[in-house]
Amino acid sequence: MSDLDLLRAHVAGDRDAFTELFHRHRDRLWAVALRTVGDREEAADALQDALLSAHRAAARFRGDSAVTTWLHRIVVNACLDRIRRRQTHATVPLPDGVHTDGEPGRHTGGVEPAAPARDHDTALVVRQALAALPVEQRAALVLVDVQGYPVAEVARMLGVAEGTVKSRCARGRARLAVLLGHLRTGSDGAPDVPRVTGGNPRPPEGVGSTSGWSRRDASQEET
């Protein structure tokens, strides 16, 4: 069955159809949530919120885009919602779900599949720099540069014009270049920033996943 067939079956009352649809795409949805939020526990909650929202809103899906695009948009908006709420608090969780709670050595949450040990510190700095970007720029960079989605599809996911996606990516890359300028390789002094692209024709395979449901489809403001 196609994604659309599964979604229609879910609307028609098939209790297993939405679960199958989610399991089909959970790896990529989880990867997007984790990279956008930067914290495993928050990402899991955001994914749960998003999938519950999609589960409830399935009957309103009009078919204007692919089902996967619709799902990604709900997940990204749920992530942005959580980031904005988190920014209103005085404390911000460390990347990858590590919470010290004021006690050295104490932490909660799992550990994201790590880069080789020699690159771990650099990877952590890059994640922290990504987390420092404005949320709209971060979402665009995660989808285009990290996940490899084409700009046109990301524009549909975020509900903005393609030019807006390109602008957000360009501004985000410029900010990362400044934030990561202290990372040097070779003799030319170029920042050791992960290579970015304009988006690959097809999404790459996903990374580790979690399961969950989601609660609401926040609207994306164009900036």
Image (tube, rainbow, N blue to C red):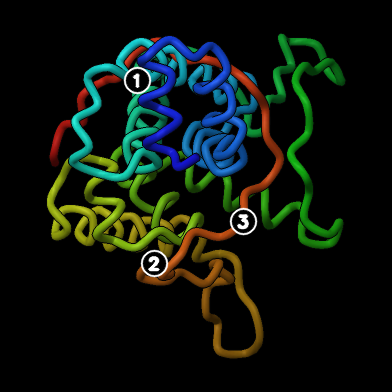
Q: Residue 205 — which label?
A: 3
Look at label 2 and name its amino acid. Answer: Gly
- Dividing the picture into quadrants, the one containing residue 87 is top left
- Whether residue 33 is visible here, answered yes or no, is yes
What residue is rendered at 37% in x and 14% in y?
A: 12
Q: CA distance from mark 2 to mark 3?
A: 14 Å
Q: Is 148 left, or right, of 118 in this rendering?
A: left
Which is more foreground, mark 2 or mark 3?
3
Q: Which of the two labelled residues, at mark 2 and mark 3, occupies the earlier sequence position?
A: 2
What residue is rendered at 77% in x and 61% in y?
A: 119
Disc 3 to disc 1: CB gap under 8 Å:
no
Residue 114, how many percent across, how many down? Answer: 78, 48
Q: The residue tagged with tag 2: helix, strand or loop?
A: loop
Q: Is 223 left, or right, of 141 in this rendering?
A: left
Residue under label 1: 81
Q: CA distance from mark 1 to mark 2?
A: 25 Å
Label 1: how many residues lie within 10 Å, few (<14), some (14-19) or many (20+)? some
Q: Nearer the viewer, residue 191 or 21?
A: 21
Above/below status of 186 relative to 215: below
Label 2: how many residues lie within 10 Å, few (<14), some (14-19) or many (20+)? many
Q: Which of the two labelled residues, at mark 1 and mark 2, occupies the earlier sequence position?
A: 1
Residue under label 2: 199
- Dividing the picture into quadrants, the one containing residue 193 is bottom right
